[in-house]
Amino acid sequence: MQIRFSRVRSDVLQFRRFYSSPVLPAPALVKSAPLSSPTAASQQCPSHSLALPLPHFHIDNFFSSSSIFDLVTDLFGLETNRKRRWQELVEKYAYSIQMDQDREAVDLLLKMNDFIRTDDDSSEYFFFQYAECLQIWLKFFACDESAGTFVDLARIVGEYDNLLLKSGFTTRIESLQTEVLKAVMRCYCKAKLAKKSALHLRPMKEFFIKYMEKYKIDFDQFNAGLDLTELLSIFEEISGAKSTLTQNTQEALTITILTHPSLSIEPYCEESGDLHFDRVCDYIADTKFKWKNRPIDVPLFCFYDTLESKKEKDEFMASYIQFNKIRQENLDKYSHRIVKSVVPSASIHSKQKFSKELQSLIRRWVRDTTKFLELKLGHEVGLKEEQSLNKFEPYFKILPLETMVSQFIQMLIGYSESNEIELYRLILEWKQRVLSQSVTLDPKNFKRSLFKFVLDDAFIELSQTLVSAIMQCCHFRVAENDLNAIAEEIQEDGGNIAGVMVPFAIESMQKLKGNPAPGLYRAFTDILKSNKKHAKVRFILINPALSKSVKLGSTFGDQHFFPLLCPPQPWLGHSTGGMMNSAINFVAGFDKLHQRFLQKAQLQGKLDRAFLCLDQMGKTGWCVNTDILDVFNKAMDLPSGLLKIPPPLDTMPTKPKDQTARDVRNQRKIYETIKAVANAYGVNGDILFHCYLFDFRGRAYALSQINHYGEDIMRSLFQFWEAKPLGERGFYWLKYQLASLFKPGKETSCEEFFEKHKNNILQAASNPLDDEALRRWWLQADKPFQFLATCMEVAKVLKHLGNGNNVATFICRMPIHQDGSCNGLQHYAGLARDDLGGRSVNLLPLETKMDVYVEVRDLVEKKIRNDIGTQLAAPEEVAKAKLILQILDRKLVKRPVMTTVYGVTRYGASEQIYSRIKEMINGIEQNPAKSSADDVLLSRLKTFQQRDATYLVEKIFAAIDDLFKNAKRIETWLTHTANRINTSYNVKTLDYLYRLKRSLKDTYITNPVNLAPISWISVSGFPVIQVYRDMPKVQTQGVLGSTSRDASENFAPMDRKKHELAIAPNFIHSLDASHMAMTCSAAAAENPSLVFASIHDSYWTHACDVDRLSVILREQFVEMYSFDYMEVVKRDFERQVRNSYQMVYFEKKGNGELYRKVKEFRKQYGESKIKHQLEIELRELDKVGYHNHTILMLIEENMPDLYYVLGKKNFLYSSAFPKEVNHEITDKVPVFVPVKIPDLPKKGDLDIEQVLESRYFFS
């Protein structure tokens, strides 16, 4: 049946006409006026394309990243002492809040406001910290301890508004707006309690109403977010608005809050306050929801299906989600305290016995260390450690010193298996843990937010003080015979402890023996070791005797993000949203410079669509497929394992000797974790959600380690919470998925596959592990567990039909996948309008599905047979070629083909092939029935080495070049452009380097550096920022010596090689991310009930909605390429280098007169060295402009060939597509010319509209 995927939509045509206009608007020269908030964005954007650039935007402004990166040049002019003065203001402000100093805090906030106003160039740099300080003050103002007045509040808020107006920041911080209104309400409440007159209360009422309207706050939404027991009545009185929450909903929420004291998580904690991973799973499983105080005996998702009316379902979900929010808040509070068991369940008794002993020991260590440190507090003049403690003393009121000590000790014990941990890594992990724990403290304790203002150096100083004290105070008794046993183990292991050579290990043991009393030994000590770069780095050693004992107990400090029990919080800012009580960034990573760029992008409204996309993805509810969970649980108990599941831990050696055995053991632990989490959520049929983050390219990932992005088993465990009837074609799509999961690339009709294997399908569904012959059949599938899950669903459909029901009424919650056909190459074909390449990856409507992997395989086979037939290859090469022919299949070439567009190197591709061959060997040995290989072939495969894959790699790359010539040209353009940008010169960079370190200026001319990351705005509007740089380092002195830390907040030269290798794959990733984001938003806008999930280029929905999603995803792809996006990117690159110059060369030979004039002109500089002449010349170019500079006028007049040197390669320099010069360039003269971004490669004649009719584009 041929399906027509296109639809006539006037808005799409309007979009196309706008972007295909030959004359595009000029770039805007003023600050952009972004949308006021993500909520406002959804109201202002047409409903069909929340994630799309809109016709009424200026195209150059929308796709310009230069406004974001003006921050780079702004900060070049930012004096170091000015940053220091700002930091002093922030530190004083934090102290005033800590000490409850009202007037001081108000004065400092006003000074911050004035500080920002007096700096037009770098106001964004300080604005976000100022906004955070203001938000803390608003919470401080609202608390009982504050003596602040309404006059203070009105003045502070008014000054904030004036700053926004003056700075042009029209994007407000939504959470701050809410705090303003709550502060007014608290002020009103205090005044009422003080029996103030109506005349006194009136200004507060007027102020509240004014700002409700000014901030465009929805009364009902604001009302719903208030504490029902405290502020609701005040809100109704001050606003004059009545609550619109239904009585039933209010009762349900109140019942949930009041009748579930049993939801406390504290009974599941250890005496120390730690929470074992297993006990977290117990807590989730034990706290099952009750509907109207009645227990539910079936999985919750099944019970939900039995509710007939929409009203009843809505009431159930309102109460259930409120119940789950309480559970989730409890989990969040303890997420930083989770410790994880590493022993098999069979050893549980010994684990519990030792755990009690260890807990007792830890409690003593914590007590002794805390007492030791408290004696040092309060000394006005003291040693370094006393100074660091005194500086942190106010923070100990928020997070007690004892808690900090406990965290460090637990983390150190957590590294006992490896016997050591680098000190700086330990400090980084502890800092992250402190910040995570601070946001999970009592929300009413607003001072918890002050931790974010603590400088990295202060954290390092305090950390060293704590670790030093721990090393001095933590001792334990070790018998001599235990030490002798450890020494014997060292010799048996080849003379090392966790990679430390025997002589050094013995020396370390002697150091550990520096004990304070006979028979006692230090638990931890420090040493200096050389790292990979031969620099001395401080490590903390864990006593091997302690390590050996801990292996019987638990590994501590394993922070683990579980799937959420309620929807994630809406994203309101780059670091506000997602988790309920955990601070995370919506773009993963800890690079502070990158986060600063995102802050500026947020102020310009460039992140609004990204926030909306993550919000929409987070709304999808999931539940565990209990049928597959049952199979998984049984498979985990099989003595020999199954497929990738290794045997149980208690069947393996506790201390494996080789790396392979250790890898297998670690793999089993991963599956144990999956099993524990899946059973926790599956036992009651709970709903679960994922919090999603973007990477820097705009690709979405789930934060939880257990999610549908995982491997086959993990994916098979997930199904949608909401079930839908199959409808007219849903059963067809179930059968289609069945066939595609079994053998992709072996295209037969899914109906034929179903009829042929119906009996096997039914038997596999009923007895997947019992019948040996049948077991072999479903294990032959490409994705065995997902295939089995589909078999089980199909079996249920057939049972439904057998009972006389209509197939369309079957309720199904299984996700159906639609995957791109080598999606990276699809995007290259779309960019290049490549007809030949587009045909190979199904951009064109064809009767049969094209499989690019099969096509490449066929071309490779043809090339190999040609080599064998012509006998041009050496005999050993011929033997290798013949072996490859025996194993050459779609799967062998798939990964190299798929990752070619993502920048895989020849070495990387050979690794992929070698890895696949090892998988083939394991598969043959574990499941001989699945393979036709004989013993001879198996023996030959075992001798195959990675270097033997080089021959096949060359054939694969040659086949790809044959099919996708235009894609290669776009890749070349991107890498060459990146090199031109990174080797450009500008005066602002020169001046910045001069102020930073004068010696850097002397090397700049001979070795240019670029301090600004290469960037572009993706089609969906997401700012892609490649912050590949040589990370700057700073030294911080502490009691244990100097610690080198990454100063990611500082600028540093970009890493040219990384930019060159990464720009093409990152560019393609940003395109597939844009397609996903646009499809997600368009699907939600068209029909909110259409459930959407994705794994990059694999889109999931219900079987009944596959046809609808098929239309949407095709339309969005066409919209992506309905205008010349590459031309827009080129223009953006040109704006990024508009004040920069390129050093190029002309040859003296043939240009003698030009050379004489240039040389004569440069004499006036008064410098003999050419690098000094060029520096002066660069400054003159910047001052007078290149059109008015004599040397450039000479260049334009004489028109010599100009050459751009890139390593050992020379290119003709012009705006034409890069062309390499084969002859050697000698006797050359350097000159500066304006940077030219090369012309784009010529496009093909592919009609992108044909994608709308392509049945196999995504399938």
Image: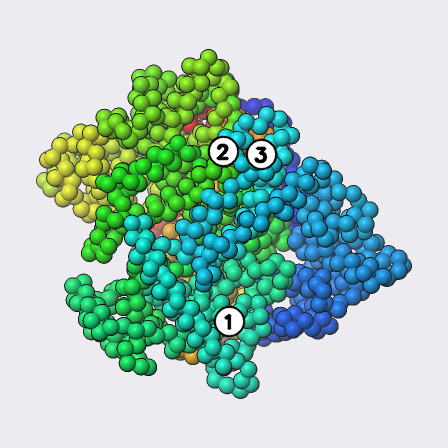
Choose the circle earlier in sequence order: 3 or 2: 2
Tell me: 205 left or right of 965. Answer: right
Name the residue beneath numbered marker 2. 297
Q: Secondary structure at mark 2?
A: loop
The three-letter code of the residue at mark 3 reads Ala
Q: Nearer the viewer, residue 90 or 594?
A: 90
Choose the circle earlier in sequence order: 1 or 2: 2
**Quadrant of residue 844 within the rendered picture:** top left
Give percent across and percent down for residue 706: 42, 45
Give percent across and percent down for residue 740: 36, 27
Residue 379 shows up from this direction: yes
Name the residue beneath numbered marker 3. 1084
Give percent across and percent down for residue 411: 40, 64
Q: Residue at x 50, y 86 (%)?
A: 382
Tell me: 744 left or right of 211. Answer: left
Q: Nearer the viewer, residue 811 or 79?
A: 811
Name the residue beneath numbered marker 1. 401
The three-letter code of the residue at mark 2 reads Asp
Q: Secondary structure at mark 1?
A: helix
